[in-house]
Amino acid sequence: MGFKDRTCIAAVGLTGYGRRGEFYERGSLSQIREALNAALAESGLERREIDGFASYSVDENDPSQLAPALGIPNVNFSNLVLGGGGGGGCGAIANAAAAIHAGMARVVMVYKTITQPPHMRFGASYGSAQVAANPYSDFHRPFGLISPVQLFALIFRRHMHRYGTTSRALAEVAVAQRRHAQRNPRALKREPLSIEEHQASRMIADPFRLFDCCQENDGGGVVLVTSAERARDLAQPPVYIMAGAQGGDSLWGQALTSQNAPEEIYTTAGHGHLAERLYAMAGVGPADVDVALFYDHFSGMVILQLEDYGFCKPGEGGALVEDGGILWEGGRQPVNTHGGNLSEVYLLGLTHVAEAVRQLRGTSTSQVEGAEIALVTSGPTNLPSSSLLLRR
Amino acid sequence: MSLLRPLAQIRPDARTRGFWEACRRRELCFQRCADCGAFRHPPLGGCPHCASDAAEWVPVRGPARVFSYTVVHHAAVPQLAGDVPYNVVVVEFDDAPGARLISNLEGVGEIRIGMELELCWDEVDPEVVLPRFRPRG
């Protein structure tokens, strides 16, 4: 079914990690060059083999700039996942796989960078002085609902009410991921973090505290996708794309800024529909997943994704993360073994793909023993979100 | 007194004007599909349930209850430094199932999900009248 195992991730290249705004002056194109060079070097692919581009989140770079700047002679595929935020990352990789499987392109470069200008930040999406009132934001902006952390806090608060999920569960996620980051030399947050320190940290938007929130960074990455045949001859072991899905539950699309999804969808990460499609395409289930890389802008959304992807029943995500339940070693379900957006870096989800690839090559700094199948997600955010199942 | 004054602007268009004009009359109205009867808010071009274009503005009276809430302690933009902490509540209405309103509670200590609310109008200026709430007393 679909393009199962017909395409591979041949390489992932990442830039260095910057503070928010640090690379703004340098620009995004130079970051893409840096990431591409790293990806080419690790794979042994030739620059001129690349003939397609795929990105997401309203990327500012299009092939008219990219092809000449990167020295790519012919462009056979060009694609952007609709929607903003980080929801389209896995979807862009799935689109690349679909194009290769369909014969439209041979090697597709999936790319994304963040270079935030000094006067903007994701954390103030709708509140900046630069964002004027408009008919869409009039229903949340005047009431002070202007930041992603606030939108997700409302959803998680209702989950707590419905299922009894605790603040302690949030702490478990933050602490487990910090422990993974401490083992990862690339991670930006490596100081020890205890449950108590999490619980004593300042409240940002109740119930989310400081350590429940991801970082905001500058940087970027390139993922090279090619056919399984081509990937087998390259320098790195191939990582097969078993399945890719993008979209989500339609009514959850209203959950974020409108907060009006029916309760059974409101109290999820909106990935339920994606999970069904993904497992069906791959022919596997949650019990087959060795390591999950969940998009973690906020700790609580890891708990909701554990439920959406069937690692436990709805409402049981809090219990699953308790007592180190998502730790790389000894955890019932290892999650975000790189430290995630919370503790490694926030690059709109590409680092989760990079960590899945490391796990399947056996090179993670928190290697899950014998890892064969990895789940990667992008979002929750406004539709579309997306996800991938990868295998070694 | 107006809450969150730095953000208290609106820019209605053809789709949303019915809601805001009702607010100026001190009436809270939601869109209801004229075919299947489903409520929706914020206003949409069509019904998400039956795709009908036909809609009417229907006054809602409640009871209104807290569906979810957050207390914002960190000012996401510097202009709100004087406003934190402030609350944001998602309000549902017994007589408008399916529609929820984002708003704020005035003069409240503890907020609880399910808490009953009453509407109070916040006139920022004659053009901008915002629906806010307080605990039902």
Image (spheres, coloured by chain):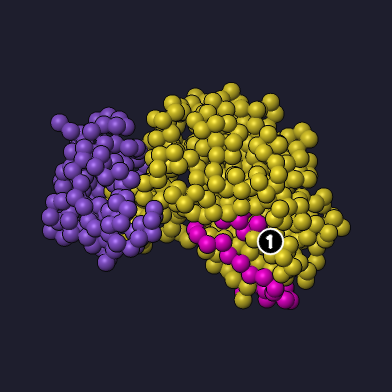
Chain colours: A yellow, B purple
What residue is at 58 percent from the left and 31 percent from the top?
Answer: A312
Q: Secondary structure at mark 1?
A: helix
Residue A385 image offset from top left, x and y in percent: 54, 51
> How dense is the environment of label 1, judged by Cα within 10 Å: few (below 14), some, or many (20 and up)?
some
Residue A207 image offset from top left, x and y in percent: 41, 34
The residues colored magenta run A65-94
Residue B36 image offset from top left, x and y in percent: 32, 53
Residue A210 image offset from top left, x and y in percent: 46, 37
What residue is at 59 percent from the left and 59 percent from the top?
Answer: A113
What residue is at 76 percent from the left and 52 percent from the top?
Answer: A5
Which residue is labeled 1 in the image? A98
- Circle 1 chain: A
Q: Nearer the viewer, residue A255 or B30?
A: B30
Q: Nearer the viewer, residue B77 or B129?
A: B129
Q: Does residue B50 appear in this view?
A: yes
Q: Does residue A188 appear in this view?
A: no
Query: Is residue B68 placed above or below A83 in the rendered structure?
Result: above
> Is A9 placed left or right of B10 in the picture?
right
User: In terms of image quadrants, where is residue B56?
Assistant: bottom left
State yes or no: residue A87 in magenta: yes
Instruction: Identify which amino acid the numbered label 1 is placed on.
Output: Ala
Q: Nearer the viewer, residue A3 or B137?
A: A3
